[in-house]
Structures are given as C-alpha cells and as structure tokens.
Image (spheres, rainbow, N blue to C red):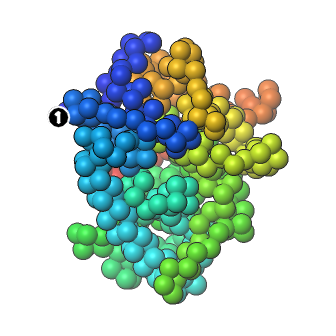
Amino acid sequence: MKSNRPEVLGEGAVPMAARTLHTLLLSWFNNQKSEIDQAQWESVCSLARASKTHGLIALGLDQHSPAAHDLRQIKKAILEQNLHNLRWTVKVVALLQGKGIVTIAFKGVPRSHEVYGAWDCRPSKDIDILVAASDYSKACAALQQNGYCPQVSNKSVWWHKCLGEAPFRQEDLHSPYIDLHHQVQQPGAPYPNRLEGFFADCRRATYGKTELCTPSADSALLIAIINYAKAMRAGEPTLARLHEISYATRTFGDDELRRFLHLAKLQGITNVASEALEKAYILFPHDGRIDRDSEQFDVVLLESLAMTQRPIFLRTRLLWSWTDGRTPLRLIRFCTSLLRLLHSGLWRWIESKTGRIV
C-alpha cells in the first residue's frame, strides 16, 4: 500500500513542489499570487494534502491558474465537511451542557475559523471536547446514554488515564468521532499541567441556542504548540501547525509575546514553545520576507514536511530538549517524563494483549 507521507529526501534536497507549496502558504503574510501549471499542480497538491495544508493554498493562487478549478472543489468539500462537524459539535455540547457539564470545544473547526476567519481553510474529521477531570465519568455516561458508542473499553487504562481521552461515535455512519478529553497530553511530549485556566479564560460564541466555549487565544496557541510537538515526535508533517502558530501571532507585540511565554512557563512548556515559535517565524515571518537561500530555512522546511531522516533516539532527544528547568530540576522532570512514557507503553502493551485496545 502506498504511503500518504512525503518522500524522505537527502540533506539539502528541497523539491520544487515543496518550495511552491511554501510560496502559496506565505501569501497569507505577503498577499502575493502565484500561477501553477497542471504538471506541477499534481505534485504540489499531493504534498499539500500530506501536510494538511491543501485548504490554505487557494489564497496564494492566481484565480486564472489551471489549478483554480480543482481548488474550488477542494474548498467546497472542506466547507461541507466542516459545517457537518460543526453541527455535530453544537449537538454534543448542548447534550453535555444539559447535564450540567462545562465543555470546551478545542482544535478542529472552531479553532480553524478563529485563526483564519473562514470555514473552508482546514478540514476537520474529529470533534475534540474538553471537560474537567471531575466531570469526565459523567460525560462518558451521558454520551453513552444518548446513543454515542464508546470506541474503546471503559476499563482501558491506556486510553482513559495515559491519554486522558476516549473516542465515541453514534451508529449513524455520518457521525464523526467525538474525542472526549479530560487532559490535553501525549505521553512523551509536553503538555499543560494546569487546565483550570482553560475553563476560566475561555471564549464564548452562540450557535442557535447553544453557547460554544473555546480556549482563549493564548490557551489555543498552547494547544497548537502541543500538537506541533506531537507531530514532531511521531515523525509527521508540522507545516500546518507552524503556519497556524505564525498566523495566530501575527498581531503580537512584545508585550503579548512576553505574556504568552510567561503562560508557557507556568504550564512547563517554555522550551517547546520557543522552538515552535522560532521555526514558525523562519518559515512564515510576519512581514512575508524570507531568505530562501538560508540553509536554516531549507532544513526547517524539509523537517516541517517530514522529509528528513530521523536520527537514532530522536524521541528521547526531543523529550530532553523540551524539558524545562535547570539541572538538577530539569533532569528530575526528564526522568519523570520518561517514567510516564514507560508506564503508558506498558499499559498499551498489556491492553493490546487483552483486547482492550486494537
């Protein structure tokens, strides 16, 4: 079976499709239009889909380009899918609110609209709902009582404790997956250790008779950075996340940036936040001007498309580089994270043998 992931290339080899894709995405910052011939379009489109940026490239494409028609169809499909997911999001939130459960809809369609101001820029397949840990069992029960079938065992330690989430879905084949969270984490990657602020500072928007709560701008940026780290650790493209991080901070002044980095410090993810911001600004500077001859630019671009060879023990190296603090505190935190990762891996192995996870 052919993989959807981009081809891994040798060091310094940046394909033309990657440069063209980047140019199209940079149009969000410099408003420049480009033309693409049909032969080149196929490789660019394939790379855009693999990096989950295919909904973002229309802004940089000249409307008379041969690819314009294809992009209109892509945008239409994304719009239909996202509006479908938004309706389900509102439905699930209304259900949980009716049970007295405070919810936050994060990532997915609401986040994409908040960042880019449109419903057709980034496709979303799943719905992510965050509840307080004290409400998690009640929320799981409420979903099951209303026809949402759990996709994992209620006794799965790996899902409910290690990942801090569980997927649900109605038997209706048109239902998206509902990922119910009480944590925002991934074993082996940074995560916020204080979720109280997510609920205290959330933003509110009304859809029909339902009030949808989403994370504040700073909390949403933290989640984007966590998702960047998750993709880095898994060897997946990070281009879409870096574009989001840069575009979401395009109006930040020095005070706003210091405020955000202070929040990242309180949450224990300063190092990964600084790394993600640096790479985002290398690829997508807010003035839209970059040095494409820079070796640093080529390295970051290839890495963001998962086109670089992964060195040995990369995940362990990443975990160390993302661990905040000075020695010996940093070493203690690093060892704690390693133990969490080993604990998670052990439970995953045990439950894969007992059939609780597939």
175 above or below 268?
below
Q: Residue furthest front?
A: 64
Which residue is rendered at x = 42% and y = 54% of the image? 121
Q: Residue furthest left?
A: 1
Which residue is rendered at x = 23% and y = 69% of the image? 173
Q: Position of residue 160 (x, y in %)?
A: 49, 59
Q: Nearer the viewer, residue 41 or 31?
A: 31
Q: Counting other residues with Cα less than 10 Å from the Cα at mark 1, is it few (<14), some (14-19), or many (20 or more)?
A: few
Q: Position of residue 199 (x, y in %)?
A: 67, 68
Q: How many marks?
A: 1
* Relative to 264, 3 lies left or right: left
Q: Mark yes or no: residue 5 visible.
A: no
Which residue is rendered at x = 72% and y = 39% of the image? 270
Q: Mark yes or no: residue 206 visible.
A: yes
Which residue is rendered at x = 42% and y = 79% of the image? 91
* Relative to 42, 56 lies left or right: right
Instruction: Please identify the quarter of the rendering in which residue 322 is found.
Output: top right
Q: Nearer the viewer, residue 277 or 290?
A: 290
Instruction: Please identify the quarter of the rendering in which residue 147 is found.
Output: bottom left
Q: Position of residue 303 (x, y in %)?
A: 47, 26
325 above or below 311?
below
Q: Secondary structure at mark 1?
A: loop
Q: Position of residue 236 (x, y in %)?
A: 42, 35
* Relative to 48, 269 lies left or right: right
Viewport quadrant of the N terminus: top left
Residue located beneath label 1 in the image: 1
Q: Nearer the viewer, residue 35 or 135?
A: 35
Amino acid carrying label 1: it is Met
